[in-house]
Amino acid sequence: MADCDSEPCRERGAQRGEDASGDTPRRKPFNARGSFVTRCEACRLPSLNCLCPYKVATTSETRVWLLTHPYEHYKPTNTGRLIGDILDTTEVFTWCRTAPDPTLLARLDDPRFAPFVVFPDDQPDYAERVVGPDAVRAAKRDGRIPVLILLDGTWRQARRMFRRSAYLAALPVLPLHSERTTRYRLRKPAPSEHLCTAEVAAELLHQTGDGEAAATLDDYFDAFNDSYAASRRHGKLEAPTAAMKRLLERREHMR
């Protein structure tokens, strides 16, 4: 039996537009706190503070592949999906230890790509694989497409994904070193240096030369964070925040 922590080896394509029959994706019911809130089908936020008006497309030289724990796909507080909202080259794969997505394996074997697993450099047994942002810039100079593989889940899940995925074992490890502290406040408090998935992506894009994409993602994350927090208080944001105003300006400039 495949070790996927739930049933979805079948659902590994859900984020790429497929259900078990290959047709329109099915949405798993969200039965935790907030399951009875009326949500926007597109952004999954409570309709009271829909995020859709602030969605802005941008581009980056570096791509992002999300290796998402099965439990994360249907959580409306998941921030990994924000990356795909603004960077349309983002790909999402459901983590499966013994039956990895064949599309992911094909991507890893494609010489056009230079993939890096984003993970802390806090253990000695993989120290020889650790690289810095210069390796990403070097891949660009060599004409390859750098890819950040983000392990999208809780810290405990991410460590399990890193340790139990043989298909990641030969890849260089790119840790994030930053003075930033997390602005994410929608789940149980974590150490302030533990950034969420969208924050990690934004910071690494900034460090490796994709500043405009990083700034857009940062603003989109802030808009998400503020919109969701207001909805939990059963209130509507009366006016756009500073980040929302910047996103609206970007949308206007794209017309």
Image (cartoon, helix red, strand yellow):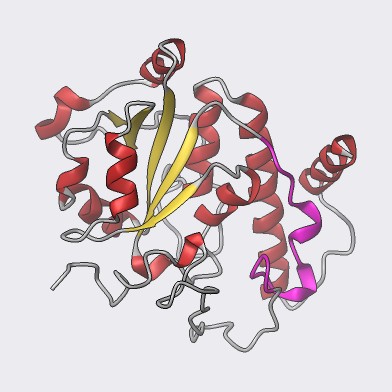
Secondary structure mostly seen in magenta is loop
Residue at the image point whose x is 81% and y is 50% from the top: 241
Residue at the image point whose x is 59% and y is 30% from the top: 60
Q: Tell me which corner region of the image, top left, top right, bottom left or bottom right, holds residue 206.
A: top right
The residue at the far left in this view is 125
- Compared to 135, does 123 lie above or below? below
- Compared to 8, does 101 lie above or below? above
Report the side of 220 relative to 120 (left or right): right
Q: Which residues are magenta?
A: 41-58
Q: Nearer the viewer, residue 210 or 175?
A: 210
Spot occupied by residue 212 in the image (x, y as percentages of width and height): 67, 28
Spot occupied by residue 34 in the image (x, y as percentages of width and height): 59, 82
Residue 196 visible in rendering: no
64 inside magenta stretch: no
Q: Tell me which corner region of the image, top left, top right, bottom left or bottom right, holds residue 114.
A: top left
| Quadrant occupied by the C terminus | top right
Spot occupied by residue 161 in the image (x, y as percentages of width and height): 24, 53
47 inside magenta stretch: yes
Residue at the image point whose x is 53% and y is 47% from the top: 198
Spot occupied by residue 200 in the image (x, y as percentages of width and height): 47, 40
Report the side of 239 relative to 180 (left or right): right
